């Protein structure tokens, strides 16, 4: 607010008194100052404030009624629509915020409350040395009216970013079982499902979304597209990603089989053990840890379904093929027919089924193109069941086909080929062999030890099952039974280094059928009942609300455009071949869905040859909509 430079009668007639409140968290008193100003002069700090001894350089004007920052100092007050009764607050832009990280630790960090959330998260991640901040965002803590006011929350808040790397719970570290049980129980209250309506709008500032100074927010990975995840540079990022995946499994946010749960528990137990050892001798082991990673992973830059894979082999003339006897089953209503063996050939992105090997040169009995299909594993190691569920898109919906393999090697080869084919890739892609090895490694970690006597005797108090498995299995088995199975599964991962174990945990999490799908309740245009919409990093899924099964899938690679009718809150997505999908979200604002779709499109444009800088304007164009 500029003080008038002249006292002419014409200018005095335009002056009125503005109510500007000053103060900050650093001032013990907040005062209301009144200044004479002209609505036609530029918005600026008052001269009286500039003459104060305090540094006001970080302050700006905030209009509480309109939830607006007056940051464009070349604008006049009249252009902002400010009248004589307006109450403005002259407040610091940088304020303290309490952040709960994925590992459940609290840190205090100073954040610019006038920046958009996307920019604020980028600055936070830069402070914590987390690469690719575009994958994360902020969300509000759930409100629990039955919970008494947090007593020691301030004591938990930390200021040093290096403490991000420390493990949160460490079974076997000498803590009492009571303390661990108490901690795990508290987490089930403060860490429920990450419901989508609690995510902050990335295109608006914290103050615009009524976030208060010193408020507690959650920093989480919002988009399940993890680009260039490299153990050499991403120790903190990998640790936080591991923590988020761990709690997603423990709190049953994602389904997994019993064998998979024991594998996750064994990995978690192993990671906790190594974390204790590492923390005890951190300085001596840090360089050695990196060397072990290089040797064990051979510069394993696992993109983990996030980035663009190399196409070095894409120009070869001979594309690999698969040919073997596979049992095929097509479920139909009121049928008792089981699997029928076929001689199947996998070529390009299609599977051809013949009644016998001798008929392979003739016309196939069945043929299916897997481009754009849904691929779901159905595996039970102890029962030697290796099934692949395929949902193949057709004009009227999805055709369901089941493939049954005879052994792990066959399953890994065909499953890897199916996953690539669903993305429009062939086995000539350089990622095929890595995909096969990842599947075999995932299966190997679930193996039961054939000789229980090989398991060394350990103090059973080192393992607390309540911190390692989900409540479902705590109810199903006794603690001693779970402990024995965890120790048995641990033999398959005991030789892994700390960073490798975390990477394998993240890989296994990504291999689960329900990984990376954000669900919305929606009503499709022309439909009467509510259904589920699932948004993943590469596709849009229409799902049955009662069963969760996919009804129809549309790949983003085939998407022409999408738009939102903000008046009726309808999202419309147009795909190739004149396919048009329109729906209204019934529980969240359509802006949330719009941001998820635009966010994944933005992430798909990343490439390794790009520099680390983010194209913020492009992100806002894709996600902000009407903002």
Image (cartoon, rainbow, N blue to C red):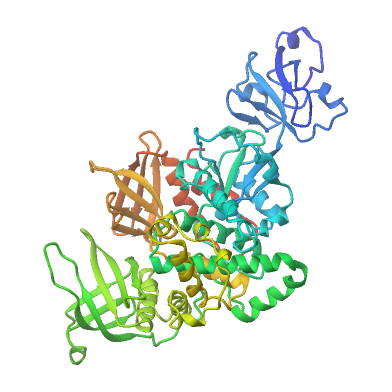
Q: Is residue 417 left or right of residue 592?
A: left
Q: Is residue 148 above or below residue 77?
A: below
The residue sitting at 53% across, 71% down in the picture is: 504
Q: Residue furthest left?
A: 334
Residue 312 placed where, x, y %? 51, 80
| Image quarter (top left, top right, bottom left or bottom right) of the N terminus | top right
Q: Nearer the viewer, residue 116 or 543?
A: 543
The quadrant holding residue 257 is bottom left
Residue 532 placed where, x, y %? 32, 49
Q: Is residue 175 left or right of residue 414?
A: right
Q: How many marks?
A: 0
Q: Nearer the viewer, residue 340 or 105?
A: 105
Q: Nearer the viewer, residue 398 or 626?
A: 398
The residue sitting at 51% across, 82% down in the picture is: 454
Residue 55 placed where, x, y %? 83, 33
The residue sitting at 60% across, 21% down in the picture is: 81
Q: Is residue 40 left or right of residue 66?
A: right
Residue 534 placed where, x, y %? 37, 53
The residue sitting at 59% across, 22% down in the picture is: 65
**Residue 618 in view (yes/no):** no
Q: Is residue 81 above or below residue 238?
A: above
Q: Is residue 339 above or below residue 19?
A: below
Q: Residue furthest bottom?
A: 358
Q: Nearer the viewer, residue 58 or 578?
A: 58
**Residue 39 in view (yes/no):** yes
């Amino acid at each position: 607010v500029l003080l008038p430079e002249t006292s002419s009668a014409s200018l005095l007639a335009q002056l009125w008194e503005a109510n500007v409140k000053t103060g900050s968290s650093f001032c013990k008193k907040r005062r209301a100052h009144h200044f004479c100003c002209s609505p036609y002069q530029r918005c600026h700090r008052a001269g009286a404030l500039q003459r104060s001894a305090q540094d006001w350089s970080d302050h700006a004007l905030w209009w509480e009624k309109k939830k607006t920052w007056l940051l464009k100092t070349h604008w006049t007050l009249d252009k902002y629509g400010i009248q004589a009764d307006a109450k403005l607050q002259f407040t610091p832009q940088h304020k303290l915020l309490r952040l709960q990280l994925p590992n459940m630790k609290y840190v205090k960090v100073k954040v610019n409350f006038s920046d958009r959330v996307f920019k604020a998260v980028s600055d936070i991640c830069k402070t914590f040395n987390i690469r690719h901040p575009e994958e994360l965002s902020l969300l509000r803590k759930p409100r629990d009216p039955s919970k008494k006011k947090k007593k020691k929350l301030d004591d938990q808040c930390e200021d040093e970013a290096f403490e991000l790397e420390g493990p949160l719970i460490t079974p076997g570290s000498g803590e009492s079982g009571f303390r661990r049980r108490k901690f795990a129980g508290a987490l089930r209250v403060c860490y429920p499902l990450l419901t989508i309506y609690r995510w902050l709008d990335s295109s608006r500032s914290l103050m615009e979304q009524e976030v208060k100074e010193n408020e507690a927010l959650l920093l989480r990975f919002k988009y399940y597209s993890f680009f260039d995840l490299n153990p050499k540079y991403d120790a903190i990022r990998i640790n936080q990603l591991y923590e988020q995946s761990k709690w997603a499994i423990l709190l049953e946010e994602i389904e997994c089989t019993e064998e998979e749960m024991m594998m996750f528990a064994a990995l978690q137990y192993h990671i906790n053990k190594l974390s204790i050892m590492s923390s005890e001798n951190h300085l001596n082991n840090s360089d050695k840890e990196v060397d072990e990673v290089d040797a064990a992973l051979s510069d394993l830059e696992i993109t983990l379904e996030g980035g663009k894979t190399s196409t070095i082999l894409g120009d070869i003339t001979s594309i690999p093929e698969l040919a073997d006897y596979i049992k095929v089953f097509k479920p139909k209503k009121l049928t008792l027919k089981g699997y029928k063996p076929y001689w199947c050939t996998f070529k390009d992105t299609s599977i051809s089924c013949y009644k016998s090997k001798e008929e392979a040169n003739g016309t196939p009995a069945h043929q299916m193109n897997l481009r754009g299909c849904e691929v779901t594993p159905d595996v039970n190691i102890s029962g030697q069941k290796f099934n692949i569920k395929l949902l193949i898109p057709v004009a009227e919906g999805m055709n369901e086909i089941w493939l049954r393999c005879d052994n792990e090697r066959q399953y890994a080869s065909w499953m890897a080929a199916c996953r690539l084919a669903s993305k429009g890739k062939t086995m000539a892609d350089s990622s095929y062999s890595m995909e096969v090895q990842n599947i075999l490694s995932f299966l190997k970690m679930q193996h039961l030890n054939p000789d229980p006597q090989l398991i060394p005797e350990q103090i059973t108090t080192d393992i607390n099952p309540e911190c390692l498995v989900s409540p479902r299995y705590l109810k199903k088995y006794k603690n001693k039974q779970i402990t024995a199975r965890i120790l048995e599964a641990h033999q398959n991962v005991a030789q892994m280094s700390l960073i490798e174990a975390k990477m394998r945990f993240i890989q296994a999490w990504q291999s689960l059928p329900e990984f990376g799908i954000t669900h919305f309740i929606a009503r499709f245009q022309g439909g009467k009942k509510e259904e589920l919409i699932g948004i993943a990093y590469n596709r849009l899924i229409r799902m049955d609300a009662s069963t969760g099964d996919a009804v129809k899938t549309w790949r983003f690679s085939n998407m022409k455009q999408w738009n939102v009718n903000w008046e009726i809150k309808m999202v419309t997505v147009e795909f190739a071949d004149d396919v048009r999908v329109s729906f209204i979200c019934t529980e969240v604002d359509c802006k949330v869905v719009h941001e998820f779709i635009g966010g994944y499109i933005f992430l798909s444009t990343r490439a390794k040859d790009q520099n680390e800088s983010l194209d913020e304007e492009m992100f806002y164009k894709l996600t902000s909509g009407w903002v």
